[in-house]
Image (cartoon, rainbow, N blue to C red):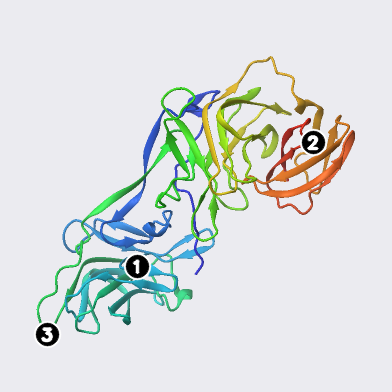
Amino acid sequence: MKTTLITLLVSAFTLAGYAQNLPNGGFETWENLLLYEDLVDWKIENSGGLAENSGAIKSTDAYSGNFSIELKPVLVDEDSIFSFFYLGRIGDEGPGGGMIYTDAFNQVKGYYKADMAVDDSATIYIVKYYGDTPSETITKLGGVQSNWTEFTVDVTGGTADSVFIGFISSDIMFEDNMNFDSWIRFDHIFLENTSGTTPSALPNYDLENWMDVEYLNPEGWHTTNGQIALQSFDAVQQIEDAYSGNYAIHLETISVGEGYNIPGYLSIGELFFNDDNPVGSVPYTYQPTSMQGYYKYIPVGDSIGLVSIEMIAGGETIGGNAHQFEPQADWTYFDVPLSYSAVPEELRLIFTSGETVGSVLMLDDLSFDFSSDIKENKHAICQIYPNPATNTLYIQSAYEGDLNVKVLDIQSRLMKSVQLSGNGQIKLDISDLSPGVYLLTSDTSDFPTQKLIVK
């Protein structure tokens, strides 16, 4: 089974209500957004890092009380994902341990409704741990049950040290039988000892207690917090160390899972985190002359923090710019000039803290400038064409020395690094790059430049 690590769950947003400028550019307004409803005491797949999976939900169709839980498999992009809820711990290969429970029992019972495809079935997975010795029981439930029906799973009797009890939306033995229209509901889960004292109740056995899982987000912006809300540390945070007002925003690159780093992202459009189009755009028809604001940047190693501003018309990039943030421990002003070949229809805007874990980018007082007096800058003597390009970029420069050119992707990862002879037309081969948006930058000390390029 494939799994998707992260997919962002935030609603789409446009600039329509904010006219020309950026919404909440001073980051003074924040809101708690609902991620999902979590089942108290039990764990569901949403509390295992798959917050975008709506396959395990609270249902008001209950056997007793007000609520039950409904499970169904979901398809996220091309990934098939089981839904499940359980008591205990999950390891790399399945159950990794149980909750402490020392009462004797030999049955797990409860109630269910189902509408399962002919070849599909749900799975009940129970493990009793007797010291280091586990005793596993796997049972399947399927078919169509329109009324609440009792189920019974016979297990090894006696007193154990701990127990794992899990309910899974699909047949874990025959994944090919998974049907995305199948569903099953469970309620009133309890244990029974047919040869002795009644066991004590499981925690939240009637599945009545639920809690909202929320994350803090700056109003008008999209961040990575939605998909990593269950990690111990958010990549994007509200901070009181502000250039002005009460708050600023803190982007930090963090590690999620083994070898998976997530930069702090701040975007005006929705974030999708796929290879084809990871950063969404919003409608925007104005022509600011520059973008400005204040920042602090504390990178780790060679990490590169940047902002990419892309103006789009007819589905093509027709202007914008990009800017690489230099390390700064104090609030520092930045101003990114913008240019166009046509009137924009959409805006794609994203900030990133860089690839290396621990790198921090802080931002405050972001805005567009619409003054007609465009400041002279070194970018004017460096032209890039064609843009978008397919296999070859040409750099027209009046700089007489050699240029140390780097090409970075939207996550600040170095894709190419070459030294090119200056003073005239420079040819750069980009045939080996995947389609996407990149930042072309020169680190030559007396000719710094950043240009946004599209392949």
Alpha carbon distance from label 1 to label 2: 54 Å
Location of mark 3 (residue): 195
What's the residue type where badge 2 is placed?
Ile
Q: Nearer the viewer, residue 104 or 373?
A: 104
What's the residue type where badge 1 is placed?
Arg
State whether residue 57 is above or below residue 172.
above
> Do callouts 3 and 1 mark residues in contact (Cβ within 8 Å)?
no
Q: Nearer the viewer, residue 89 or 126?
A: 89
Alpha carbon distance from label 3 to label 1: 29 Å
Residue 257 percent location from the top left of the image: 49, 59
Location of mark 2 (residue): 384
Q: Nearer the viewer, mark 1 or mark 2?
A: 1
- Marking on residue 140: none
Q: Nearer the viewer, residue 304 or 79?
A: 304
Q: Earlier in the sequence, mark 3 or mark 1?
A: 1
State whether residue 326 is above or below residue 225.
above
Residue 18 percent location from the top left of the image: 49, 25
- The residue lying at 16 percent from left, 58 percent from top is 65
Location of mark 1 (residue): 89
Label 2 Cα neighbours within 10 Å, binned few <14 / some 14-19 / many ≥20: some
State whether residue 83 is above or below residue 282.
below
Q: Is residue 257 left or right of residue 421?
A: left
